[in-house]
Structure formats: structure tokens, C-alpha cells
Image (spheres, rainbow, N blue to C red):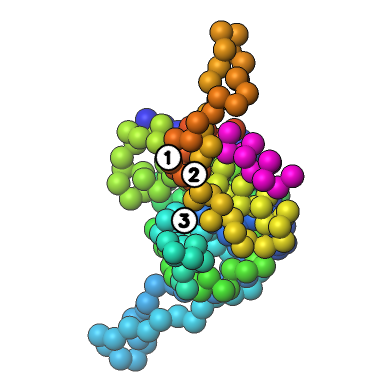
Amino acid sequence: MTVEFPRAPYLYREDEPHAGPARPLSQGDVFLDIPLVGPAQPHPRQEGTWVAPKPRTGPSALGLFVTHPCGSRSRGTHALNPFLSIAPVVKCPTNWGPPWEGWYEYFPLPSLRNGEDYVAKLSEVCPVPSAALEGSRIACLSGDGLRALFHRLAMNSLRFPETPLHYGIEAERLTTEINLWERWTSHQGSHDGFHEWLDEPFGGQAREDAEGSAIQGSAEPSGESRRAVLVWNREEVIEEMNNFLS
């Protein structure tokens, strides 16, 4: 099943860093001037041995954060792991464009920088120190952009197109969590306390009357954490944060 590529895949996009300063670094972010390591090459004078090229940096060294937060952050502290998986980003091949069909080893990044189209090379992912990403972000994908990324990652690695509904659900859940985290950071001035708040019990969803209006005071705790209900109770969790931060 084909997933249509969104016309506007970005939540934030800037020609130069740093985009979305209060937003946590996450899957789908694009970075500029980061150290990218290419594949090993045969040694020019020693047959049977290999040498690693020097990291590429500078204005042409762009990369896309491809690892899901569950694999890129500590489960205990939620801090970024020391090294992250980044797909190199290069200018788009001249013979490819909208509707961005096929070529699953590429993830399109239209009008990414200075109005030019780029692609992330999903088959050339390399490790990059997480410290090198700070202050270097030029774009963040929207929920629709993440959904398209999930589809591309699955098609490139597995050629398995049968779960597009999951991509949409997970993209919405992840986007909601990062949006809440960004709002918390903007309001509080730091990340401190956000994950503890998100892991607290969800207050519950209010029942509705015959006209479909919420009955105030009818919500009952479900026993689940706010994090666990983000997909199905997004609006209620947002309201709880509004009340907490007000």
C-alpha cells in the first residue's frame, strides 16, 4: 500500500541552525554541519586492509535523525544516547521528484535548504555523537512527515507496506509527546520534571451526556499513565498540561 507523501512535511524549517530551540531533538530532525562518517575504503598501499575516511563536516554535511526515541534515549533518564543513527542528506537526484514514488533508499526532503530539494540516504546510516547535534538543527518533521518517514524506513529495510495505519498512529503519538515536551520546556525553562509528569496517572476521560457534551467531574482515573494514553486521549492530556502549567 502506498503512503502519499505530504505536501508540507515540516513542522519547523530554517536555512541555518537552530530550528525549534525549545523542542527536544528527536526522530525526523535534520541537522547541518555535523560529523558524518562514510564507509571504509580499501587501503591504497596495503592490500587486504581497510581505512575509515575522515568525518565530513561543513555546510554540505547534513543528516537526518532516523532512530525512534525508544532506541535513541535512555529509558531511565530520557537523555540522548552518546551516539545516534543519522542518515546522510544530499541534494536530490535530478531525475527524481514529486510524487516521490519508488527509490525507497531515499527519503525526500523537498525545499529543505535555500529552496532546493534534498534526500536522506537511508542505506548509508552512520553513528554520530549526540553532542554534535546540539544547536545544529535546521528542520523538524511534522506528524505527516514522520508517518512518511516510517513508511520509507519499512519499505527500504523490509519492503513491507501492509501497516500504514500503524505509521499514522505512532506518528501522532510521538508528535504529541514531543509537542508536550516542547511546551513544557518553553514554559518551565528546562526539561526537568516533564517525564515524571507524563508518567503520572491519567485523570480519565469525562463521560458525555445525551447531546455529546462532556459531563464535568465525571472523569475517573484509568490506572494508566498519561504517556500510555497519548494516542487515544490526546486532548485530555493536553488539557491536563494546560491546567498544570496555568
CA separation in Å, label 2 and label 3? 22 Å
Q: Where does label 3 land, which residue? A: 69
Label 1 crowding class (10 Å Cα cut-off): few <14, some 14-19, many 20+? few
Q: Position of residue 199 (x, y in %)?
A: 49, 50
Residue positioned 54% across, 28% down in the render? 219
Residue positioned 33% across, 83% down in the render? 50
At mark 1, the secondary structure is loop
Label 2 crowding class (10 Å Cα cut-off): few <14, some 14-19, many 20+? some
Does residue 48 appear to the left or right of 172 in the view shown? Answer: left
Assign the magenta stretch its main secondary structure: helix
Residue 169 versus residue 113: which sits nearer the camera? 169
Q: Where does label 2 land, which residue? A: 201
Please tell me whether residue 241 belongs to the stretch shown in magenta: yes
Residue positioned 53% across, 20% down in the render? 207
Residue 48 versus residue 72: which sits nearer the camera? 72
The magenta stretch is 236-246
Three-letter code, disc 2: Pro
Q: Position of residue 232 (x, y in %)?
A: 48, 32
At mark 3, the secondary structure is helix
Three-letter code, disc 3: Pro
Task: Find out whether the residues at labels 1 and 2 contact each other: C-beta distance under 8 Å.
Answer: yes
Location of residue 25 (image quadrant) = bottom right
